Image (tube, helix red, strand yellow):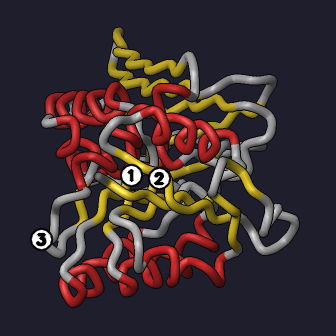
Amino acid sequence: MIDVAVAGATGKLGSMICSLIREQKDMRLVGAVVSAEGGRSGTELYPGIKAVGPDGIAELCRHCTVYVDVTKASAAEVNVPIAIKAGANVVLGTTGISPEFVERLGPSLKENGRSAVVTPNFSIGVNVFWDTCRSLAKALPEYEVEIIEMHHDRKKDAPSGTALRAAQIISAETGVDRFVCGREGIVGARGREIGIHSIRAGDIVGEHTVVFAGHNERIELTHKAHSREMFAEGCIAAIRWVASRNDGAVHGMDEVAGA
């Protein structure tokens, strides 16, 4: 049985993940972590599952197989190392996580014999989308690239982690390392850059388009999320995949998907 604790358990995605865990025959929800400020700590979220604040993570993770974090970057970067040290494998799906933090995870995972899946997006389709971005960038290194991402009006970070990951992948293939987030005023001729543009409106779950523009033609690659349920389902797959690993490494959803 895979015992799972979820941080961000009362958020939209977190609550969906908790519900799906409880439906799995090979998983058991054993803990729910909420924010210290108004996060309903001490209340029973599910039968036998009382919410705890961040100060309860270490104790929870001594008794669980996998710790899932879908909170916010500032909280995750404090709490994930605690979970690893306590003995849990990790699934980290919080956007805005810095590359430097991911690098620092490696030594901690090795020291404690744990493993982690880290991704800004649990969608299997998005991981294929990123792989296609890589292929297009490799084939079209001189084409100009613009990224447009759209999300609901309550999303806190911009640009999205998915858009930034796409930009990083394209940058690695093309050598274009200047990212411009939006433009305003008289900006002059476009330079060697990747433009990233964010839209926040209504209840848009998530949509990402990458435009590769050359002379007399362009290619547009788009991924649209129809429901948050696919993110929760991807998280379940990540939990199941990482549960029995102890290789001291950070993995991505491409490995979970077998890409």
Task: Say which quadrant the C terminus sits in.
Answer: top left
Q: Residue at x 57, y 21 (%)?
A: 227
Badge 1 amino acid: Thr
Can residue 141 be spotted in the picture? no
User: How far, Cα to Cα, is label 1 from label 2?
Assistant: 5 Å
Q: Residue furthest front?
A: 48
The secondary element bearing badge 2 is classed as loop
Badge 3 amino acid: Asp
Give the camera-side residue of 83 and 215. 83
Can residue 38 be spotted in the picture? yes
Residue 181: mark in rendering:
none
Residue 93: mark in rendering:
2
Residue where numbered disc 3 is placed: 247
Badge 2 amino acid: Gly
**Percent coordinates x, y for residue 194 in the rendering:** 45, 44
Q: Are the residues flagged by discs 2 and 3 in contact, CB closer than 8 Å?
A: no
The label nearer to you, 3 versus 1, is 3
> Mark 3 vs mark 1: which is more N-terminal?
1
**Percent coordinates x, y for residue 31 in the rendering:** 55, 62
Count every numbered label the image shows and give the total. 3
Residue where numbered disc 1 is placed: 119
Give the camera-side residue of 71 and 5. 5
User: How far, Cα to Cα, is label 3 from label 1?
Assistant: 18 Å
**Percent coordinates x, y for residue 64 in the rendering:** 39, 67
Give the camera-side residue of 150 and 231. 231
